[in-house]
């Protein structure tokens, strides 16, 4: 499945993601280093913050309390904010567009 990523300088990249990985891993494994993912996907750093295309919002797992608390610490949080390590990637997300959030 395809994942479309907008980087911080506005460049759009189309990635071929593998099911079974998180959106964070798909982005990082494509060599995009703007996602620091300092905690390695444990939902404790918020450096994997992305904005997700609202059209896909209902295909994503609900935000957990931990994710919600962490997102509150991000300056650019809005209704489309998610932590990409908490989003399993798969065929149902084919064509989803995400934008990497500003660094805090
Ligand atoms: Fe740390 Fe997602 S990688 S919260």
Image: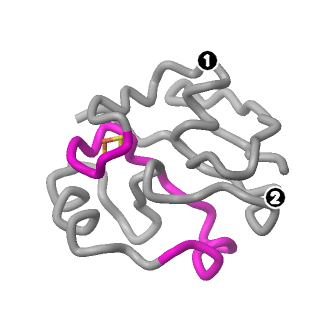
Q: Give the image location of residue 67, x and y in percent.
A: 28, 63
The reply to whether the magenta stretch includes residue 29 is no
Residue at x 66% of width, y 55% of height: 89
Residue 29, image x, y percentages: 62, 25
The answer to whether the residue bearing label 1 lies less than 8 angstroms from the nearest atom of ligand 1 is no
In the structure shown, which secondary structural element does the residue marked by tag 1 occupy? loop
10 Å crowding of disc 1: few (<14), some (14-19), many (20+) = few
Image x and y of residue 82, in percent? 42, 59
Q: Which residue range is magenta in the image?
A: 41-61
- Residue pictured at 67% horizontal, 24% vertical: 30
Give the distance between the C-alpha atoms of the residues marked 1 and 2, in whole angstroms. Answer: 20 Å
> Is residue 47 depicted above or below 60 in this figure?
above
> Splitting the image into 4 quarters, where does residue 103 fall?
top left
In this view, the residue farthest toward the front is 20
Element at label 2: loop
Between 44 and 98, the one lying in front of the other is 44
Q: Magenta includes 57?
A: yes
Q: Give the residue displayed 56% in from the left and 37% down from the top.
A: 25
Residue 43 is tagged as none
Q: Decide: is 48 above or below 54.
A: above
Task: Say which quadrant the C terminus sits in.
Answer: top left
- Where, by quadrant of the figure, is residue 54 drawn? bottom right
Q: Relative to 2, is 12 above or below?
A: above
Residue wearing tag 1: 31
The disc, 1 or 2, on the residue closer to the chain's N-terminal end is 1
Could you classify mark 2 by the number of other residues whose Cα lies within 10 Å: few (under 14), some (14-19), or many (20 or more)? some
Q: Which residue lies at the image location 22% right of the left edge and 74% below the top edge? A: 65
- Residue 42: horizontal and vertical position, in percent? 30, 47
Which residue corresponds to mark 2? 94
Does 27 sit left or right of 1 as displayed? left
Quadrant containing ligand 1: top left
Question: Left or right of 39: which side holds 78?
Answer: right
């Amino acid at each position: 499945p395809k994942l479309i990523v907008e980087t911080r300088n506005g460049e759009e990249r189309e990635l071929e993601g593998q099911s079974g990985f998180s959106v964070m891993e798909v982005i990082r494994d494509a060599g995009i280093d703007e996602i620091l993912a300092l905690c390695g996907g444990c939902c404790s750093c918020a450096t994997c913050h992305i904005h997700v295309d609202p059209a896909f919002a209902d295909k994503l797992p609900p935000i957990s309390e931990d994710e919600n608390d962490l997102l509150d610490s991000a300056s650019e949080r809005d209704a489309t904010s998610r932590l990409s390590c908490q989003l399993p990637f798969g065929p149902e997300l084919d064509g989803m567009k995400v934008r990497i959030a500003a660094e805090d």
